[in-house]
Amino acid sequence: MSEVISSGSLLEIWQGNRRLTRRVIEAFPEKELFEFSIGGMRPFSELAKELLAIAVPGLTEIAGGDTGSLSEDLQVHSKAELLQLWDEATEGINGFWPRISPERFGETIRLFGQYENTVTDSIFYFIENEIHHRGQGYVYLRALGIQPPFFWER
């Protein structure tokens, strides 16, 4: 099977999306980041905490670390704390990424003990889930009268 995208390119796509999501977090006023929702959706802080619960723990498992259960129970009480955790996760992703051998991307895994897929498809899920939740954040920002960051500026 020939390679369509390099490991480094995939990492850059993911990190580009993370930079954009970080700017969405920054765009929220403090109170609304933790309280504003529409139509029963979770506040954006909760969506960001989900993304944090998946990224480094999932990549740790992919890189050969312990298999754990998915836990979104992060205690975050301010935008500054959320951004700090976001930045730490970004560095964590960069740290674990080189530990994934090229052969590993095609292997099937059971992430968090329950989600069976290839490593590549699992990483695409991480990225697609982030894009999905960032779209919810865009809706929230627009409803608050705030111009969201341009999606193409990753």
Image (tube, rainbow, N blue to C red):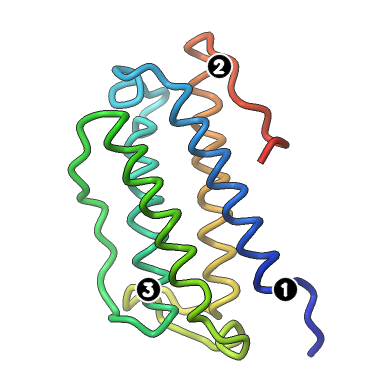
Report the residue at 25% width, 70% height from top. 69
Residue density around tag 3, few if under 14, some if 14–19, many if 20 or more, within 10 Å: many
Label 1's element?
A: loop
* Closer-to-camera residue (6/45): 6
For the residues marked 3 and 2, what is the alpha-carbon distance in whole angstroms? 35 Å
Residue occupied by mark 2: 142
Residue 113 image point, x, y percent: 32, 78
Residue where numbered disc 1 is placed: 6
Q: Which of marks 3 and 2 is in front?
A: 3
The amino acid sitting under disc 2 is Arg
Distance, label 1 to label 2, CA atoms, is 35 Å
Judge whether 102 appears above or below 134 on screen: below
Residue 72 or 97: which is nearer the viewer? 97
Residue 60 disc label: 3
Q: Point out the tag, 3 or 2, that comes first from the N-terminus.
A: 3
At 33% from the left edge and 56% from the top edge, which residue is drawn? 53
Foreground of the two, 46 or 77: 77
